[in-house]
Image (cartoon, rainbow, N blue to C red):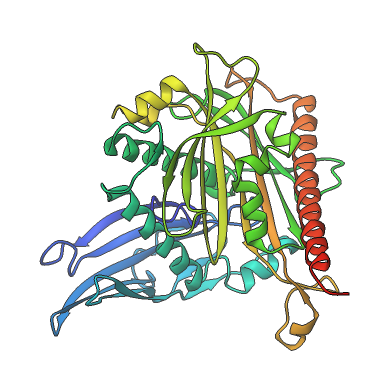
Amino acid sequence: MELFPSLVARAKCVQVISQGVSGTNGCLQLMYAELHVLSPLVPTREAYFLRYCQQQNVEDETHWAIVDFPLDGFHNSLQTSFPLYKRRPSGCLIQDMPNGYSRVTWVEHAEIEEKPIHQIFSHFVHSGMAFGANRWLAVLERQCERIASLMATNIPDIGVIPSPEARKNLMRLSQRMIRTFCVNISSCSGQVWTAVPDSSDDTVRITTRKVSEAGQPNGLILCAVSTTWLPYPHHHVFDLLRDERRRAQLEVLSNGNALHEVAHIANGSHPGNCISLLRINVASNSSQHVDLMLQESCTDKSGSLVVYSTVDVDSVQLAMSGEDPSCIPLLPLGFFITPMELMNDGGCKDEANEHNITTGSLLTVGLQVLASTIPSAKINLSSIAAINNHLCTTVQQISSALSSNCIGSCNEGDNGKEK
């Protein structure tokens, strides 16, 4: 789950059937997993399966095989409550390379019961982009860079981070923020979502959660999620939303407040893979009270995430001092962006009509608010109307900003041409 938060909602080892000869070599486990897309519009995939790991040494090179296969004929009593999903033989082959890298081959093979999926995600799921091997590999590569950054001791950090240990702790806090966001905006764990009555956008869904444990603000939390297709490349959308200076231009997201980066952690070779600690410059800020925002952005070929949450100075100092950060309340907001080409007639990409496609992306926006500090409180219609209006305004302002940037770029290009 920690390695693949945008793909794995829940996972656990139910039973160790065979310990193996050394470590995990030869280990056979009964596993459970629930896979998700970061939207309530896509049902999760839940399954029990067997996982076998084997190591071989071939000509001074180490090879690993991690194979998942179905429970057919075993444990027939294990049932899931979601649409049928069976993991047919799947997994990965890992080969050590002389240069210190690894060569990874990934295979995804599944049997799935067809269920209706909202049209906006239909191609994303049925094409294999949502759960296919290419996405697993892209996320794995990016997460390996993040782990390398976490373990590194010689990477200079920008800003107020006092030590390598503080850096690690802030990265772990940010990882929990990402994890919380991913779980809270999907349909995992049987979370029930409701369409907003009379909404102009049929992709808007809302839900409430009663929270009384540490890690999130206690009370009644209202969450709203919407997905929109945008006629702009996915990296253009990502660049707009990850840059706190450009995002501050979107009034609905900034509340008119400027953001100033006070700490920066690089998480990989792409400049968009990073963690930022931002100071929110508002009139009420003083030396006694400073509002901060923790933000992590990450991107790969399969999609991008931008997630952020307000935090207070005491919480940040607690996290960086090495204290347990699990008690720090986080209520993250954010964006999930995936590349998605669309036919000019409104359909999805067809290989026979590649000349008739528009490059674009799917933008999923997830917002959360503490509707009441009393977990047993009832949600009122005004709160639903307010968050729905905020969500729709957010999408409109993002689309307008992208359109303005596109027009500006086109005009610059035209001005540079000879007449």
Side of 55 where 187 appears, left or right = right
Q: Is residue 224 above or below residue 370?
A: below
Q: Is residue 276 above or below residue 238?
A: above
Residue 67 picture location, percent across and down: 32, 72
Q: Which residue is at 36% across, 24% downward?
A: 318
Nearest to the observer: residue 70 or residue 197: 197
The quadrant of the rendering that contains the C terminus is bottom right
Q: Which residue is at 68% across, 54% downward?
A: 363
The reply to whether residue 117 is visible in this rendering is no
Side of 177 where 249 appears, left or right = right
Quadrant in the picture for residue 244: top right
Side of 74 where 304 appears, left or right = right
Residue 297 picture location, percent across and down: 52, 48
Q: Which residue is at 55% across, 13% downward?
A: 286
Which residue, as the protein is rendered here, is positioned at the far top? 288
Nearest to the observer: residue 30 or residue 298: 298
Which residue, as the protein is rendered here, is positioned at the far left? 21
Q: Is residue 216 above or below residue 188?
A: above
Nearest to the observer: residue 138 or residue 268: 268
Give the number of callouts. Answer: 0
Which residue, as the protein is rendered here, is positioned at the far bottom? 352
Residue 255 picture location, percent across and down: 71, 29
Q: Is residue 398 above or below residue 47?
A: above
Q: Which residue is at 37% across, 24% downward?
A: 317
Residue 170 picture location, percent across and down: 38, 36
The reply to whether residue 110 is visible in this rendering is yes
